[in-house]
Each structure stands twice: as C-alpha cells, then as structure tokens.
Amino acid sequence: MSKKDDKNPVPEDRLEHFIGIVWSLVEPFGVDEVADAMEYIRLLSESIERHNFEKRYKISPQKKSHSDRVRFISVFKSRYLEFTDLEYTRPITGVDSKLISQANKLLSDNGFECTDYLKWIYTVFIPENEQFAPGNIKLVCSQVFLHKFLYEHREKKKEKENQELARKEGTMLLNRVRVLIRSNDDKKIIEDARNLVKRFKEESIILSEFRSGVKNLEQQAKRKQEAL
C-alpha cells in the first residue's frame, strides 16, 4: 500500500464506498430535486447500512428477532415485579412470542424501543387505568394499547424521525467527504476536508454548516479539476 493510500484509505466495506459515491453524485446531477428518486436512494442506503450492521456484528434477522423478544420479556418482567412486588410466573407461549415480535416490529418501525413502551405502560397507562392492572404479556402486546402509546407520543415520533434523518444525512455527508479525499490530490482541500470532519464529529459545527462546508469543498475540487 502506498503512502497516499495510508493517508486516504478506502472505506473498509466496498458497499459503503459505493453508497458514498452514489450520494456524491446526487447534487451534481440534480437528483436531489426528484423526490421519488431520493426516496429510492434513501432505501438503498438503509439496506446497505442494515446489511453492514448485521455483517459486522454477525446478527441474522432471526437472531435479532429472538434477541429482541428476550429483551422485551426481561424488561416486562422487571416492570411487572416493580409494579406488583410479584414475580411474573406465567409461561411464555408460542402465541405470546408471536405477539411480542409483532409489538417489537411496530415499535421499531415508529422509532421506539420496547423499554420506552413498557415504561409508559407501568408508570403512566396502568396507574391511570387500574382496571387493566396488573397486566400480562397478551395485554401489553394489544394493538389498542400499542396504538394509544404511539398516538400519545406522536410528537416524540416526529422528533425521533427528524433526528434519524439528521443522522443519515450526517453519514451521507461523511461518505461524500471520504470520496472527496480519496479522489483528490490537492493537499489544501484534503486538509480542509479532514478539519471539517473533525469539527463536525466534535460537534463544534452543526449539520447545516457541515453540509455547506462539504458542498464548498466539492465545488473547489470540481473547479480545480476543470482547470486542468
């Protein structure tokens, strides 16, 4: 490996490198102005991100689903014990497991963890609706209660969605900087790019400033390339 490669390493995963290139072409080709196309690019990014996570941590979808169920049961039993001073001794049936998986998916799809939901069940909902006390697995996995939780937390859901969008845009911009560094020989641009990343990671600049900085560096690199 050359010294240049040491200084400007390619992302370890080729898929990460690929999606970085895709995102770097979005603005120059005006794809960001096509809403449908952007949605497909976001879905592609999420698929690659999910694949890389599962590959990195060797987690199959089946193992993750099982792990999530175990976590739900553990948190539920802890909340149940705290609320009633009694151990939850009912066996977890196959039907219970299916309901738990469905509840986990609904919560996850809306940006919540089972910990958020079960905390609300036993600190807010059941204390205010004692006819449902002490609750059981089937009860807390009820679509009625799950939807009530999601409805009452709809503003928080929007906040979480905005945070997730910001996280994804930050990742996309970091990938664009990696591509810029990798494909550039201008020492000043490379140094400025690294400093920009450092400031963003240290949170000394906000996302909009990072976005502007990346765009400016890309324009500089493009002008220098056109001048050759």
Image: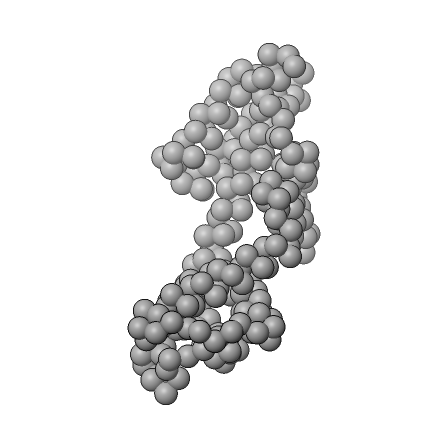
Whether residue 206 sits left or right of residue 181 in the image: it is left
Residue 222 visible from this viewpoint: no
* Residue at 43 percent of width and 59 percent of height: 159
Instruction: Place residue 180 in its image quadrant.
Output: top right
Res 199 quadrant in image: top left
Relative image position of residue 46 (x, y in whole percent)? 62, 49
Position of residue 141 relative to residue 9, above or below, is below
Q: Nearer the viewer, residue 84 or 166?
A: 84
Question: In the picture, which quadrant includes the C terminus?
Answer: top right
Image coordinates for residue 62, horizontal then vertical, percent = 64, 57
What colour scheme does the image use? Answer: one colour
Left or right, residue 84 beside residue 162: left
Which residue is the extreme one toward the bottom? Answer: 131
On the image, the x and y values in percent for residue 100 come to 54, 69
Residue at 47 percent across and 79 percent down: it is 139
Q: Residue at x 58, y 35 (%)?
A: 175
Where residue 168 sits: x, y (%)?
53, 46
- Identify which residue is drawn at 60% across, 75% down: 95
Query: In front: 16, or 184?
Result: 16
Question: Quick one: 172 or 55, which is closer to the camera?
Answer: 55
Residue 22 as seen in the image, left or right of residue 145 = right
In the rendered image, the quadrant that contains the N terminus is: top right
Q: Tell how many labels.
A: 0
- Residue 170 visible at all: yes
Q: Camera-side residue: 172 or 2?
A: 2
